[in-house]
Amino acid sequence: MRPSPTRHRLALVVALLGATLSAVTLIVHERLAGGGGYTSFCNFGGVVNCDAVLGSRYSTLLGIPVAGWGLAAFLVGAAAAVPGALGGRSGGLADLLLLGLASGSLGFALVLAVAMGSLRRVCLLCLGLDVTVAAWLITVAPLASGFEVNTGSGWWRRRAAARAMAAAGLVIAIAGGTWAAVRGPGAVTSVADVRARDPKFYQWYTRLPVRPIGELITADCHRKGEPDARVAIVEFSDFQCPYCVQAFRDLRDLVRTRSEVSLVFRHYPLDATCNVHVTRSLHPDACLAACAAECAGRQSRFWEYHDVLFENNEHLDRESLFRYARDMQLDLGAFRTCLDDPATRARIGEDVEAGKRAGITSTPTIFFNGRTIEGALEHLYYDYALIIEKHTEHGHGEGAS
């Protein structure tokens, strides 16, 4: 029994939906590749972050955006579905092409799945495309029944050819997904390597404004690493900011693995209760959380408490802050007294004023040897920034100016 035009029409609709999603994904990819500062509509910070996936090394295959490959496959597949959708004979070259494309598109879906798993990020656009690919294959697979069993027919009309095409597509899909999982970006060790690998990033980064490190820090700032580290990072952040959570995880990994890096944390809560430079409280628990971190700092536990706050940044109410202090076995009496002390809030205000002088309007704002980065970078770009800074003489360390 030959498939009815209905199945071809469904295949056409799904292919056009896939082409639309691929086009949107491609636009986001290209805007991300155009330099820093762009944040897509599906970047919610933290785990749900399309930008981290579409801006990563997994986003291209053979120098072409993965979304571009997907767009081409869906458009060609849509064209192949048109004859059958208009009532033409099934089981010919068009259906053979459609079967191969639908099966092979699993490779496209696998690349996106590998990227999300490797980066520990969820891309909603990628998930949408994965679901569309699966729906497309389920819709198209029964078309194989429209091919002839008779060996006297042309090879392109034989059912064996349809099965072979579908199998070939699956093999390509599995091979492509496996290659995407194991391929590496190659060693990048010099500024020349960075410039060659990602000229747009290099151009954007090296044109960022630079502030003297001495204007950004004071002696009582919270610091990880040596004061005279080759690369000094100063972060102005907000514990309730979802984008700051992404920066926190990447910077924490950076400091853990690079002895030449120091990190200074300064508060800039987007909460009007302690930040006079914001008109409304975007993050109403941010000031209290910042005070709690300072109080943990008075008991020499700032960085540990800092990590707990970022890992639980959706639960920063007063009760939760005390629970975290209790779990860390802090002196709760001293913690409570400190939390209610106006001097603690004044200490947050000192960081806020320093941030204002540095021109900060959003969080996170990160200074790499004084170079101003607004927003969180994709993890790979922190490595690129370190390479550039280690070979740049515009100043570093606490006394740089």
Image (cartoon, rainbow, N blue to C red):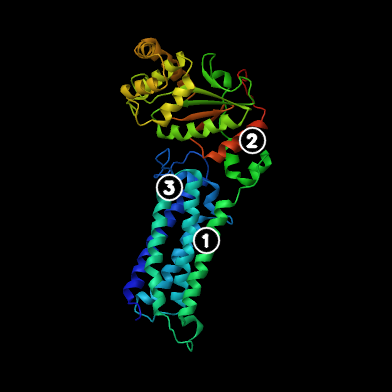
Image quadrant assignment for residue 371: top right
Q: Which residue is mark 3?
A: 123
Q: In the picture, which quadrant includes the C terminus?
A: top right
Rounded to the nearest whole Å, what is the CA distance between mark 2 and mark 3?
Answer: 28 Å
Between tags 2 and 1, which lies in front?
1
Q: CA distance from mark 2 to mark 1?
A: 35 Å
Does residue 30 sit above or below 293 in this rendering? Answer: below
Residue 169: x and y, percent? Answer: 50, 67
Q: Nearer the viewer, mark 1 or mark 3?
A: 1
The spot of residue 277 in percent (x, y) is 38, 22
Q: CA distance from mark 1 to mark 3?
A: 21 Å
Query: Residue 217 placed where, x, y %?
Result: 53, 18
**Three-letter code, disc 3:** Cys
Res 174 label: 1
User: In which quadrant will I find the N terminus?
Assistant: bottom left
Q: Which residue is identified by label 2?
A: 387
User: Looking at numbered disc 1 in the image, what kind of residue is underneath it?
Assistant: Ile
Front residue of this view, candidates 372 and 364: 364
Q: Amino acid at mark 2?
A: Ile
